[in-house]
Amino acid sequence: MIWNFLEKYRDIGLLVIRFGFGFGFFWFHGKAKLMGGPERWAQIGDTMQLLGIDFWHTFFGFLAAFSESIGGLLIATGFLFRPAAAMLGFTMLMALMSHLISGQGNPGHAFKNLFALTGLIIIGPGKYSLDFLIKRKLDTINQ
């Protein structure tokens, strides 16, 4: 079709998606949560009660803040891409459940992010990523 000429730019497209998605998570979601400290983390971690987990709310809140901030940067750079995307995907699953069960807020954002992250886990970071560069370097060393 008319758009087929863009096929050769697939990895550049992944880079654009990774950078925008990852940096957006860091800047607009994770940074403030991470800097919020233990009180904010405990508030976020209370969501784990949806799974029947009534302990370590501060720890789980920190993990959510970490996944949205540092995980977002890892996604943007393509370093430890799949583990970071999986961790952030779990955070989005919890956010989705929280919105649906409480009836507060719009679950649409978490829903779309969960599916986008699932797709990115399957596709991978592409060749313009730190994961790809490290793998290529290790393959060269191991030959």
Image: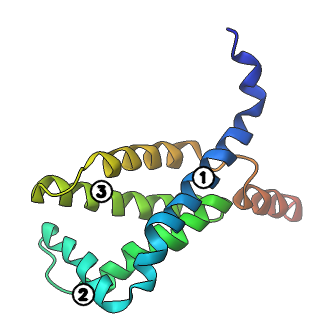
In the rendered image, residue 12, in percent from the top left (x then y), is placed at 74, 41
Residue nearer the viewer, 23 or 45: 23
Mark 1: few, some, or many residues within 10 Å (few <14, many ≥20)? some
Task: Kindly state the secondary structure of the residue where label 1 is placed.
Answer: helix
Mark 2: few, some, or many residues within 10 Å (few <14, many ≥20)? few
Disc 2 residue type (three-letter): Trp
Q: Which residue is mark 3?
A: 93
Q: Which residue is mark 1?
A: 20
Judge depth for marks 3 and 1 and give the one in front: 1
Disc 3 residue type (three-letter): Leu
Q: Which residue is mark 2?
A: 56
Residue nearer the viewer, 133 or 117: 117
In the rendered image, residue 114, in percent from the top left (x then y), is placed at 37, 49
Say if 73 sits above or below 14 in the image: below
Disc 1 residue type (three-letter): Gly
Quarter of the image for residue 96 reads bottom left
In the rendered image, residue 87, in percent from the top left (x then y), is placed at 43, 64
